[in-house]
Amino acid sequence: MIIEQMSISAPPGQSEQLSSALASLTGPMEVQPGCLACRVLRSCQDPNEIFIQAKWATTEDLIVHLQSDAYKRVLLLMELSPKPPVVQFYTVEEVRGLDLVKEARSSEN
């Protein structure tokens, strides 16, 4: 699985508009093959900072996404940012949940 994370700063007074524009792209992204999840989030510390997070099944799925019209619109919206956007991709080998918490807590002694 590949996790895609972006942080984009909205120009002053335009965080609602930028957030809405990015949120409108989550639907087209979610129906792309291999998209496991996609969401837009706002920072609690800085209301002008907007995050996009998407999860992709394979690197190939991510590459198709990066070549899509939806991603082209994301790139255009990034250009509005007064600060350089941050774009990161993480390759995940294993995903664990509460089983890991239980395991860690039980071996605490």
Image: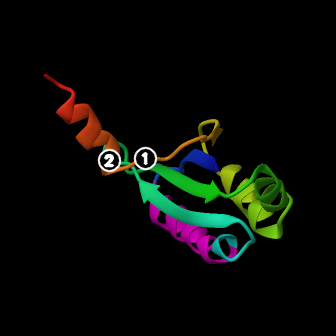
Q: Residue at x 49, y 52 (%)?
A: 50
- The answer, for residue 81, to whether it is visible in the render is yes
Q: Is residue 85 above or below residue 17?
A: above
| Magenta stretch holds residue 17 | yes
| Magenta stretch holds residue 82 | no
Q: Residue at x 50, y 61 (%)?
A: 40
| In the image: residue 22, left or right of residue 47 | right
Q: Is residue 62 above or below residue 83?
A: below
Residue 84 position in % (x across, y down): 64, 36
Q: Residue at x 44, y 49 (%)?
A: 48
Distance of label 1 from label 2 (alpha carbons)? 7 Å
Give the labeled residue for mark 1.
Answer: 96
Q: Amino acid at mark 2?
A: Asp
| In the image: residue 31, left or right of residue 17 | right
| In the image: residue 29, left or right of residue 13 | right
The quarter holding residue 92 reads top right
The quarter holding residue 30 reads bottom right
Residue 21 position in % (x across, y down): 59, 69
Determine which of the numbered discs, if any, sits on residue 99 in the image: 2
CB atoms of marks 1 and 2 within 8 Å = yes
| In the image: residue 66, left or right of residue 3 | right
Which residues fall within the magenta stretch?
13-28
Which of 86 and 37 lies nearest the eye of the viewer? Answer: 37
Q: Amino acid at mark 1?
A: Arg
- The answer, for residue 87, to whether it is visible in the render is no
SS for tag 1? loop
